[in-house]
Image: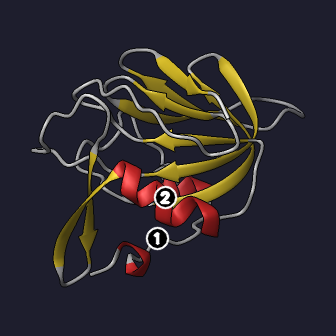
Amino acid sequence: MKISDLPFRERPVLELLNLEADREEPDPDYAGYGWARVPSISLDEHEIADALVLALHSADDGEPMPDDIALEFELPGAGSVLVLLSQFLAEWLPRLPRASAVVLAMCNPHGATLEFETGVPVYYADGDVESWLDESEGPHPDRLRLAAEGSWARLAP
């Protein structure tokens, strides 16, 4: 299968980040993927406006690499496909809507330091990433938040 043929689709952000149902803890077995454009999302306590969120799943048994990440796409009824993040982004980012920033909702289990150019800032985490919906009272909307095990890195445009 070619990278361009992967079923990487736009999804409602709550579905994309596995936040549709009330939950006490994130589901460690959730391996959903796709994209959503959001007006804002928090990376721990740092707010990112006008973000294209890419939900990706790093391969649980992926080879440690210093500057790339092996992604795994579980395909319905067809097993899974492994692809490097760098190859995936080179193929898919030009096809997706433009936003002020790209946020990779993806675990980085081996602490890879990414280096590539996209034209906009790209944010990614060191270590595991969990998604949360911080509910608020009153006129303010609920807040989408990604929490990183380590810190968040920013690739310059």
Task: Residue 25: give its label.
Answer: none
Element carrying mark 2: helix
Q: In the rendered image, which quarter is residue 107 located in?
A: top left
Quarter location, residue 11: bottom right
Q: Is residue 18 above or below residue 43?
A: below
The residue located at (48%, 45%) in the rendering is 22
Q: Nearer the viewer, residue 5 or 156?
A: 156
Residue 101 lies, with reference to residue 155, above or below; the image says below
Q: Relative to residue 74, is residue 62 drawn left or right?
A: left
| Residue at mark 1 | 8
Where does residue 24 sit, x and y in percent of width and height?
A: 38, 33
Residue 90 numbered mark, or none: 2
- Secondary structure under tag 1 reads loop
Q: Mark 1: few, some, or many residues within 10 Å (few <14, many ≥20)? A: some
Q: Mark 1: which amino acid?
A: Phe
In the image, taking residue 48 as reference, residue 81 lies left or right, namely left
The reply, left or right, for residue 14 in relation to residue 99 is left
Residue 136: x and y in percent read 73, 29
Q: Disc 1 vs disc 2: which is toward the camera?
A: 2
| Residue 85 place in picture, x, y as percent | 36, 50
